Image (cartoon, grey):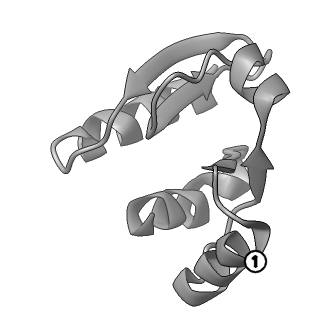
């Protein structure tokens, strides 16, 4: 989450949008988590339609879309080694 918050701060003026989805948690717990962490990008509770539309089968899942809203890349999981790769992908997509 801190890395995504940093990316959002860095690239939101250039067009980056990050949307967080919470799965299977009570709304009050999600709200408390967002508040405690100071999450700076929109978050929503994900239910059946969203999960099926985007084929979410496991989390964390990062889905990258181009400016034309077409899906360009999908990554399951997160680790520290992926930070640079994610940032480069974001920069590439923002240039399109």
Query: Nearest the camera: 95 or 38?
Result: 38
Residue 59, above or below 32 = above
Quarter of the image where the N terminus is located: bottom left
Question: What x and y, as percent, mark residue 88?
Answer: 37, 34
Q: Residue furthest right?
A: 49
Residue sitting at 73 percent across and 44 percent down?
A: 15
Query: Nearest the camera: 40 or 31?
Result: 31
Residue sitting at 67 percent across and 70 percent down?
A: 30
Q: Residue furthest left?
A: 81
Kind of element beneath mark 1:
helix
Q: Residue furthest bottom?
A: 36
Left or right relative to 82: residue 49: right
Left or right relative to 8: residue 3: left
Question: What x and y, as percent, mark residue 17?
Answer: 71, 46
Residue under pointer 1:
28
Residue sitting at 19 percent across and 51 percent down?
A: 80
Q: Residues within 10 Å of mark 1 (few under 14, many from 20)?
A: few
Question: What x and y, as percent, mark residue 58?
Answer: 46, 29
Quarter of the image where the C terminus is located: top right
Determine which quarter of the picture holds residue 25. Answer: bottom right
Question: What x and y, as percent, mark residue 2?
Answer: 42, 69
Residue sitting at 45 percent across and 37 percent down?
A: 59
């Amino acid at each position: 989450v801190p890395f995504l918050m940093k990316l959002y701060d860095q690239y939101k003026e250039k067009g980056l949008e990050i949307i967080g989805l919470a799965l299977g948690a009570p709304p009050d717990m999600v709200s408390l988590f967002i508040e405690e962490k100071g999450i700076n990008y929109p978050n929503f509770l994900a239910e059946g339609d969203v999960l099926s539309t985007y084929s979410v089968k496991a989390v964390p899942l990062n889905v990258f879309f181009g400016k034309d809203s077409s899906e360009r890349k999908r990554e399951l999981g997160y680790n520290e080694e992926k930070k640079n790769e994610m940032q480069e992908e974001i920069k590439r997509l923002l240039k399109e």
